Image: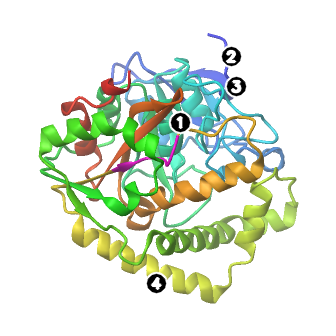
Amino acid sequence: MADDVNAFIDRFTLDGVGDGPLSGRTFGAKDLFDIAGRVTGYGNPAWAASREPAYTTASAVRRLLDAGATCLGKTHTDELAYSLMGVNAHHGTPLNSADPRRVPGGSSSGSAAAVAAGLVDIGLGSDTGGSVRMPASFCGLWGIRTTFGAVPLDGAMPFTASFDTVGWLTRSGPLLAEVLRVHGFASGAPRRLVLPVDLWAEAEADCVAALGPAMAALQAHLGPAMPVILAPEGLAHWRETFRVCQAGEIWQALGDWVSTHDPQFGPGTRERFEMAASITPEAFEAAQGEKSRIAGWLESIIDPETVVVLPTAPAPAPLREADPAALDGFRLRAQALLCAAGLGGLPQLSIPAGAVEGGPVGISLMGAGGADLALVELACDAGLGALSA
């Protein structure tokens, strides 16, 4: 099948192993995961030029192959994964098949585009600050950020030490549940639904309205949602804590390479790396302390029986012709909704739940560490996903 959506940077076939639970399924791997014999380009030509072909294959790729799934190639990513919009100045913007007028989201842009276009069944991605959840919402897909540390990241390009996670995108909940079972996640039984009113206030009114049927279905399944203020200090404080911690860790991981190679970054990416370079040790240490405190707070209020329901994004995806300033403004707004799971190391599932002016919007379920499969099973049992059709 032709790649008419610019999802892939490298197309090839790696057959799955034997007759496993994912036999007959196909996947695309985000181009920050190593595959033996191929260069990992990480969304930037200078990075690709500085790398030799990988000697081994990343565990996240190997696990899908061992379960029987066939890899059909490497998919596009934003430059060094440092964006949420899916716009790459060097390789272009993959097409969002759900609404071609809009960006696909990133940084797992190609994986989302490939799944949305039906080129593959599973999109393998990574999520640090929303890089699976955002494209899932924008493209009308199921997408999960897994519990921090639950899925090995060996063979993945460096980015952050305490936020990076593996994630996947699919067109259905049952398939995503099967992927999670292959990775050893266990079922659970959430019983309490929590609605963080401060996070819902970040979404636009028409987005909230579009999520109404999904919210009603969840409450019919679990009972009335309990309203809470998730961030007593304010979401702006949480977002800033996340920003400083993430940027500081990115510069620790990539600063030497950036300084040595002086790559030609596209708009937005260049400014973000300049900001990351400016984080002082004192600011970074203070933000890390706040991150630990916030993680403890989240652990105290989200137990294995609790599910937090929130909008994945404040609105549908921006239009493709939006300028870099508008895209960065949307990214900043979205981080208020996305930062909690990162700060707490928690799993968050985005489910297609409706549309605003033709653009898909997703509703999210966030749970305690290890509740990844329980979130997907709950969404399936409540009939979510089908409500977006």
Q: Is mark 3 on a helix, strand or loop?
A: loop
In percent of width and height, residue 104 lies at: 61, 35
Q: From which residue to which does the magenta span run? A: 310-315
- The amino acid sitting under disc 3 is Asn
Mark 2 to mark 1: distance in Å?
18 Å
For residue 4, the mark is: 2
How many residues crowd mark 1 within 10 Å: few (<14), some (14–19), many (20+)? many
Query: Majority secondary structure of the magenta segment?
Result: loop
Query: Which quarter of the image is occupied by the C terminus?
Result: top left
Q: Where is residue 16 in the image (x, y as percent from the top left)?
A: 45, 23
What residue do we see at 73% from left, 70% from top? 275
Mark 1 residue element: helix
Residue named by callout 4: 289
Pointer 1 residue: 138
User: Going by the image, does 1 lie left or right of 164?
Assistant: right
Q: Are marks 2 and 1 in contact (CB under 8 Å)?
A: no
Mark 4 and mark 1 residues within 8 Å of each other at the beta carbon: no
Give the residue type at disc 1.
Phe
What distance separates the C-alpha of mark 3 from that of mark 2? 6 Å
Image quarter of the N terminus: top right
Residue type of the residue flagged with mark 4: Gly
Badge 2 element: loop
Q: Mark 3 points at which residue?
A: 6
Q: Distance between the residues labelled 4 and 1?
A: 33 Å
Mark 3 touches mark 2? (CB < 8 Å):
yes
Q: What residue type is labelled 2?
A: Asp
Relative to 54, 16 lies left or right: left
CA neighbours of label 3 inside 10 A, class few (<14), some (14 to 19), many (20+): some
Left or right of 229? Residue 71 is right
Of the numbered discs 2 and 1, the one sitting upstream in the chain is: 2
